[in-house]
Image (spheres, helix red, strand yellow):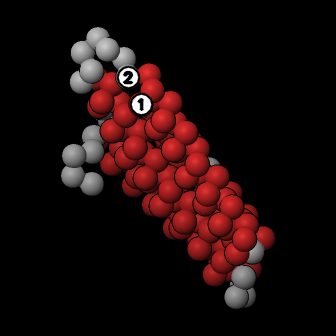
């Protein structure tokens, strides 16, 4: 995580904490072998969310360094790549089992929740 901004590091920390909470919730809810695919779906989706944060920060840094020439095609490419990553993790989880798909769906929501949580960290830049 070297080279990431403080805001990105805090968002990644919130994503990891939320993933842990969701995995524990899955263990309590399922209390069976079904908790494993649920947790696997959550972890896969959270790993994709971390990659998406890194890609988003790289895109922002490239846009800042462009000095007046806005790299529109790079922005669209990065957006499409982030979309494909999300769709890919949901597709792979759906191929594994329905329980993994539900876990991946919960895991995907950790990114917007972590963005909302940054409201409570006013000193993050």
Quadrant showing the C terminus: top left
- Whether 119 is drawn above or below 106: the answer is above
Callout 1 crowding tier (Cα within 10 Å): few <14, some 14–19, many ≥20 = few
Answer whether residue 29 is visible to the viewer in this image. Answer: no
Would you identify the image quadrant in which residue 69 lies? top left
Q: Residue furthest front?
A: 73
**Residue drawn at the location 35% of the way across and 38% of the way down:** 57
**Residue drawn at the location 43% of the way across and 53% of the way down:** 51
Q: Nearer the viewer, residue 89 or 47?
A: 89
Residue 1 image position (x, y, % from top left): 27, 54
Left or right? Give the position of 1 relative to 21: left
Residue 96 image position (x, y, % from top left): 70, 75
Secondary structure found at label 2? loop
Secondary structure found at label 1? helix
Measured Cα–Cα span from mark 2 to mark 1:
5 Å
Q: Residue furthest bottom?
A: 33
Callout 2 crowding tier (Cα within 10 Å): few <14, some 14–19, many ≥20 = some
Q: Residue furthest left?
A: 2
Residue 11 image position (x, y, % from top left): 42, 47
On residue 74, the disc is 1
Q: Nearer the viewer, residue 59 or 43?
A: 59
Left or right? Give the position of 101 relative to 67: right
Question: Mark 2 sits on what residue?
Answer: 71
**Residue drawn at the location 40% of the way across and 43% of the way down:** 55
Residues at discs 2 and 1 in contact (Cβ within 8 Å):
yes
Q: Nearer the viewer, residue 125 or 37?
A: 37
**Residue drawn at the location 54% of the way across and 66% of the way down:** 44
């Amino acid at each position: 995580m070297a080279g990431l901004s403080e805001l990105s590091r805090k968002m990644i920390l919130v994503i990891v904490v939320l993933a842990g909470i969701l995995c524990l919730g899955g263990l309590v809810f399922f209390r069976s072998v079904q908790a494993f695919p649920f947790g696997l779906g959550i972890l896969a989706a959270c790993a994709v969310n971390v990659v998406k944060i890194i890609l988003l920060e790289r895109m922002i840094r490239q846009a800042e360094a462009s000095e007046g020439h806005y790299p529109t095609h790079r922005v669209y490419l990065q957006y499409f790549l982030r979309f494909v990553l999300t769709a890919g993790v949901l597709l792979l989880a759906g191929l594994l089992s329905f329980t993994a798909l539900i876990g991946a769906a919960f895991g995907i929501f950790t990114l917007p929740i972590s963005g909302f949580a940054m409201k409570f960290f006013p000193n993050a830049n």
